[in-house]
Image (spheres, grey):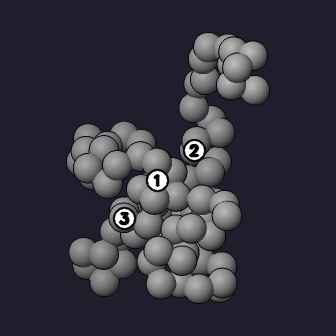
């Protein structure tokens, strides 16, 4: 099961593809804690986000994946982890 499908299933989304994720759903999808996402948002760092209906914070999954791909990587993967 992919992270996206697991996040949808855990959030009660079934098999319908979802574009906007809550902090909790994105935390499940990405493995980044909701508290880290909140901290980044408050410091104007991290992935792009939107507010709906005044206070409902949501992350566009495509924008999150693009942001993730743009982040610097580092290190080499050892043979035992390939």
User: Up-down: is 80 above or below 66?
Assistant: above
The first of marks 2 and 3 along the sequence is: 3
- Which residue is label 3 attached to? 24
Q: Residue furthest front?
A: 80
Q: Is residue 58 left or right of residue 70?
A: left
What residue is pinned by disc 2? 67
Q: Secondary structure at mark 1?
A: loop
Q: Which residue is mark 1?
A: 48
Image quadrant in which you'd find residue 81: top right
Q: CA distance from mark 2 to mark 3?
A: 18 Å
Q: Is residue 33 left or right of residue 75?
A: left
Give the mark toward the camera: 1 or 3: 3
Residue visible at 30% across and 44% down? Answer: 36
Residue shown at 53%/84% (left/top)?
13
Quadrant location of the C terminus? top right
- Give the residue drawn at x 66%, y 84%: 15
**Quadrant of residue 6 within the rendered picture:** bottom right
> Vertically, is 53 above or below 74?
below
Give SS at disc 3: helix
Pointer 1 with pointer 2, Cβ within 8 A: yes
Neighbours of disc 2 within 10 Å: few (<14), some (14-19), many (20+): few
Circle nearer the N terminus (1, 3) = 3
Question: Is label 2 in a helix, a strand or a loop?
Answer: helix
Residue 16 position within the rendered picture, expressed as x and y whole percent measured from the top left:
65, 85
Q: Tell me where residue 33 appears, x and y as whole percent.
A: 34, 49
Q: Residues within 10 Å of mark 1 (few under 14, many from 20)?
A: some
């Amino acid at each position: 099961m992919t992270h996206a499908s697991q996040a949808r299933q855990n959030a009660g989304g079934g098999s319908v593809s979802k574009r906007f994720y809550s902090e909790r759903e994105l935390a499940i999808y990405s493995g980044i804690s909701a508290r880290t996402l909140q901290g980044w948002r408050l410091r104007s760092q991290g992935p792009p986000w939107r507010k709906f209906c005044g206070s409902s914070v949501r992350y566009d999954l495509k924008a999150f994946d693009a942001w993730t791909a743009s982040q610097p990587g580092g290190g080499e993967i050892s043979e035992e982890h390939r």
